[in-house]
Amino acid sequence: MKSKLLAACAAAALSCALASPIAAADAPPTAAEAKAFVDAAEADLAALSEYGAHAGWVQATYINADSNWLAAKANAENTEAAVKYAKQAARFDHVEVDPVTRRKLYLLEQAVVLPAPARAGAAKELADLQADLDTLYSTGKFTYQGKTLTLDDMQDILRTSRDPAETKALWEGWRTVSPKMKDDYVKLVALANQGSKALGYADTGALWRSWYDMPPDRFGGEMDRLWGQVAPLYKSLHCYVRGRLNERYGDAVQPRTGPIRADLTGNMWGQAWGDIYDIVQPKGGTGLGYDLTANLVKQGYDATRIVKTGEGWYQSLGFAPLPQTFWERSMITRPRDREVVCHPSAWDVDNKDDLRIKACFTVTADDFYTAHHELGHNMYQRAYADQPFLFKGGANDGFHEAIGDFAGLNALTPDYLKQVGLIDTVPGTDADIPYLLKIALDKVAILPFAYLVDKWRWEVFSGQVTPDHYNDAWWDLVRKYQGMAPPAPRPADAFDPGAKFHVADNTPYARYFLADIYEFQFYRAACRQAGWKGPLNRCSVYGNKAVGEKFAAMLKLGQSRPWPEALKTFTGEDDIDASAITDYFAPLAKWLAVQNKGERCEAV
Ligand code: X8Z
Ligand code: ZN
């Protein structure tokens, strides 16, 4: 953490660098001025970030009018500063500076998710809208059969309910929370677009696409290219799952052709289908051989033990234990007596070692996985904690999401589960297809969803989709890419995108699409380093310190270098490549092709 004194000195340097507008107009700025500007901006932003994180933590773990007020104030101050520095950084676009300063200027120019216009009060307006949207989502409830349910209550029922009337009621019930968000969302889009334009971006979508060390226009094309690589696998899985749902529920509930009914997937957004494995599992054979949720429950796991087990995985690769404060300050279960933001997140409050997780974990295989995911963020944060403030971040936001996913993919292998005593025996090779299917139900199923959430937002930000068509445009994309449909026509006032956390919370989502691909690149590289020769799905690098060292070398870079360099440090590859995920699932793809013989798979 930067000291107050240093921050004050650096701020003084900033005013020097910008002292004379006449001089600035006459002579181009110098490299020394650029460096002084960057140092000052960095110190100021670091201090604001720490303050904002404390306020944000209180708001997220104790939602009320006061915590919202405090968090919105801090958020507005952060936005104002970030926008100011982004504009000022552009002054140095054509100045020859050292590579570190150049990288920091590049990062400064795009270091804000929702920029506010410069006019007085605009940043606060935008921050208040964000706080309102967040609160509407996180405190949303639905009364079902006389009981007031939170989202996690509803998700918990959806996971196991096999009654289509019930899944429909809950699916629709959760979406009664979001119509109230629409007006705020429309205002937020307009404000953020004004802010983005003032920074020189066509709209906020273009700003979001500028985060990947390539021109924003190219990034959209990259997403399309990657989707093209994985779409055949998704379509094949979709076709198979639809057939099994049809056998389970009959034509009246789930027809054999056309879209999958979204509420039948065991997940509120149809983005992860692992919880309906019981319906879609291969017929005959020995099956998966175990039920991880049941085993966790049987062995008396609680949220703390789940997180401790996750920590153990990272320690086995050589990562240091979590600090004591992690255990004192994290929130890992839903408190009974107050409103909180339950959607899981990982924090580094002081940008050094005040690491925390905030989640409402229950004892399920899903949350066992998510604990590894969240800890991945914390391990990354700690690995780059020695970098200067502007380099504290993922090589790109997809990397940040992929670290814990790489851990989770290892931690789900039967080999590892046996080592930590969560299963008794490692199933034989006949369990490989069931295992791959189970993993695909989460890792392949999410791909079109992760692709379309920001596709929708890009269309919204660009004005291609106007507020009157927000919901229809959403469903057009869901239908086209996920091949899904709502259980019944949607009401005229529906604002279904708002029923997804990342839309209400304004968290960009392309990162999860990228992460789903990086994760398998990391995994394939780690297994190669470990000299693994068997089927990829059976590889676990648990306990492998050499892999851990190489992995840590990538994490330590933070965002100091363009992401292809970070990727190369660990994998030897310098481009995002979906062949790792298609390699991993190759045996399943073959199996699905056989299962799908005679199905009308093209008919989505
Ligand atoms: O939001 C998350 C993490 C927190 S960064 C739990 N995920 C996405 C989601 O829940 O929609 C992980 C998978 C995708
Ligand atoms: Zn995450």
Image (tube, helix red, strand yellow):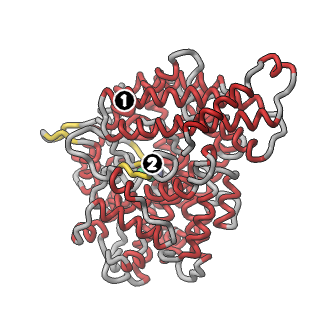
Q: Which residue is drawn at 58% across and 21% down?
A: 117
Residue 200 visible in the current orientation = no
Distance of mark 2 from mark 1, alpha carbons?
A: 18 Å
Does the image show residue 369?
A: yes
Horizontal and vertical percent position of residue 33: 78, 32
| Relative horizontal placement of residue 236, taking residue 175 as reference (left or right) | right
- Left or right: residue 588 versus residue 216 is left
- Going from N to C along the chain, the mark reached first, 2 or 1, is 1
**Amino acid type of the residue that numbered disc 1 sits on in the rendered structure:** Asn
Residue 488 in the image, given as x and y percentages of width and height:
32, 38
Residue lying furthest right in this view? 27
**Residue shown at the point (28%, 47%) measured from the top left:** 152
Asked if residue 269 is positioned above or below residue 490 in the image, the reply reads below
| Residue picked out by circle 2 | 347
Task: Tell me the residue at 19%/37% (across/down).
Answer: 143
Which residue sits at x=46%, y=43%? 479
Q: Find residue 10 and report its horizontal and vertical position in percent.
A: 65, 34
Q: Which of 155 and 235 is in front in this view?
A: 155
Q: Is 565 rendered above or below residue 451?
A: below
Q: Is residue 216 left or right of residue 513?
A: right
- Label 1 crowd bin: few (<14), some (14–19), many (20+), radius 10 Å: many
The residue at which mark 1 appears reads as: 68
Q: Which of 454 and 172 is in front in this view?
A: 454
- What SS does tag 1 mark? helix
